[in-house]
Image (cartoon, grey):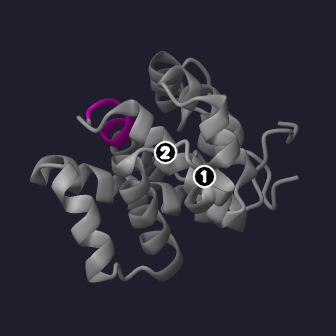
Amino acid sequence: MARLPYADLNHPDVRPLVEQIVAERGSVLHLYQMLLHSPEVARGWLSHLTGIRQRSTLPGKLREMVIMRIAILNGAPYEADQHAPIALKEGMTQGQLDALDQWEASTVFNEQERAVLAYTDAMTRHVHVPKEVFAAVKPHFDAKRLVELTATIATYNMVARFLEALEIHSDDER
């Protein structure tokens, strides 16, 4: 169970934002129901995540691979629960999802995917990215997509940390 109660979705201060979230996302996930304790933070978060997930030119398969790897590294099951179906829809295989935990020993990832996973691991585990890791990922992307990849990794580390600090989980009652 989450460390804080979830926000009241019927409170007048959050109702317009709830309607926006439902229109854009289909429902108010636990993450947003917690964020709605601070409508301004929730609004900024929604705008930022919409940019990362829906307006980026980074291929969806790579975006979701990054998100799933971050969920594993950070021990963030809510993030994995939410994104596994999306990852499959975006083109990851079940074999790739199953191999993410030990991707370095797997043969199911191509050169670009391996470079992206190494970059994700470096940013997530160490913050500082070794020159050789950056040198391996750089040839696969133009500047715009490299910025989008980096922002995606940074953003979903933020998401995982928020979820885990407040112990938000998919099976929480609301």
Q: Residue beneath label 2, please?
A: 109
Mark 2 residue type: Phe
Report if the CB atoms under discs 2 and 1 are less than 8 Å apart: yes
Q: Nearer the viewer, residue 26 or 136?
A: 136
Residue 96 vertical placement versus 40 (above, below): above
Q: Residue at x 51, y 62 (%)?
A: 157
Q: Residue at x 74, y 50 (%)?
A: 77
Residue 102 vertical placement versus 90 (above, below): below
Question: Residue 51: x, y in percent?
Answer: 30, 39
Q: Can residue 38 be seen in this snapshot?
A: yes
Q: Main secondary structure of the magenta part?
A: helix
| Marks 2/1: CA–CA distance | 7 Å
Q: Which residues are magenta?
A: 50-55
- Quadrant position of residue 56: top left
Question: Residue 125: x, y in percent?
Answer: 53, 76
Mark 1 residue type: Ser
Q: Residue at x 58, y 47 (%)?
A: 68
Q: Residue beneath label 1, please?
A: 106
| 10 Å crowding of disc 2: few (<14), some (14-19), many (20+) | some
Question: Residue 80: x, y in percent?
Answer: 67, 44
